[in-house]
Amino acid sequence: MPHGHTLSRPQLVYLVFGAPTYHQEAQFSIVSALANLRKTPGEALDIQVYSDNPEPYQNLPVSVHTLDAATREAWNQPYGYHFRSKHMVLRQVLADAPVAALIDTDTFFHQSPIELFRRIKPGTLLCNAIGANFGSNPKCRLYQSLAALLESRGLADRQMPQLNSGVIGLMQEDASLLDHSIALMDEYYPHANGAYTLEEFCLAVAAYRRMQLNQCTDLLHHYWSRKQLFRAKVQAWLAKHQHAPLSCQALQDVALVNAQLPKPPALHRLGYKALSLTLPSDQRQFLRELMYGCYEYPNEFDRACAPVWWAKALENANARHSRPLCHEQLHQWFERPGMRLSLGNKHSRVRDMLIKRSQR
């Protein structure tokens, strides 16, 4: 998008760089936006992708802006804080567009993205979610390092609502909010003790008492929690549809990649509990968690989460023991008749995968 070229439609913006996983997330998020756009016929938007790798987006109707390392580095200065670039890219888009929303890659839509833009009005900041008040957790790193500083300058107090910046939506006339937020990041970064969330915190401070806050958790799912399970669903969708992401079948399957955590029905979970009683007490929880991945979910994208459930079961078992389980120990666990019987035809697959992980 050449600077100075005015855009009239709402702009959905993605900033994607680094590991292939982030590009996979972004691809699916974009397709979910397009699939749900069909719920608002006659409405249109533009999708802008700022990325270090244009290749993953070649089958999608988006404008890709290749970002070189030098630009990204400049956007992250003066401290190399990489979330600062989120505000920089949105600032750039809003120089030419009446309204824009920057979306994190680990998201997918339930509703038309047009609904996002209906929530962005003059004087309103759209975020993903409005969180607890700043003072609700005095032990939090940012509270301990910044509360007194901010209060003494009248910038924030205990009542300030915090927010999640998985979505940042603004009208062009309110773009100066981003300048204020960037200035706060630059000023407070040295005092923030490396707090990961400084970017969304500074956005909350910049908006406090000046802007209305609006949220959109009902319009899209931001899977920052239980990320591996949702990534498994997304990767299964991509494995099936990457080469024709906008085919009828691909768009139809978008709805099957849903926000539910795949859990077996309650009756099955009770059965797993009973099965686990055949094992020594330190192995029961491990088996019950493995069974979450063994259940034959009717939804193919839920079935794709099996290896994540198994890896999580091992991670939790390691956390319960004073030291990680060695592969000999795991081998013994998997050779127990109760374990063999419970896992059935999945036994070898689960055992081999987890023993391999334990040898890393």
Image (spheres, rainbow, N blue to C red):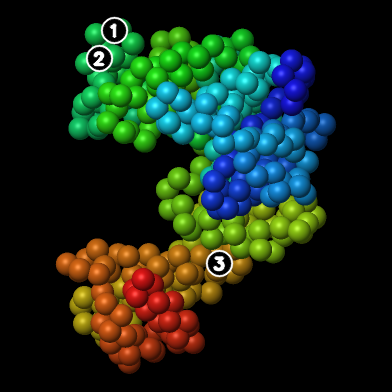
Extreme residue in the right direction: 42
Q: Looking at this view, name the residue that lies furthest to the left.
A: 322
- Location of residue 342 with respect to 312 vertically, above or below: below
Where is residue 188? Give x, y as percent. 33, 20
Q: Could you tell me which residue is drawn at 54 percent across and 46 percent down?
A: 18
The answer to whether residue 146 is above or below residue 238 is above
Residue 148 image point, x, y percent = 22, 16
Q: Is residue 313 left or right of residue 324?
A: right
Q: Which residue is mark 3?
A: 304
Q: CA distance from mark 3 to mark 1?
A: 51 Å
- Asked if disc 3 and disc 2 are in contact, CB closer than 8 Å, the reply is no
Residue appearing at x 55%, y 23% in the figure: 88
Residues at marks 1 and 2, CA–CA distance in whole angstroms: 7 Å
Mark 3 or mark 2, whichever is nearer to me: 2
Kind of element beneath mark 1 = loop
Residue 49 position, x and y percent, is 67, 36
Q: Position of residue 75 (x, y in %)?
A: 52, 26
- Which SS class for mark 2? helix
- Residue type pointed to by label 1: Arg
Q: Is mark 1 in CB contact (under 8 Å) with mark 2?
A: yes
Give the amino acid at mark 2: Leu
Residue at the spot of label 2: 149
Which quarter of the figure has residue 103?
top right
Type of amino acid under label 3: Ala
List the residue tagged with mark 1: 153
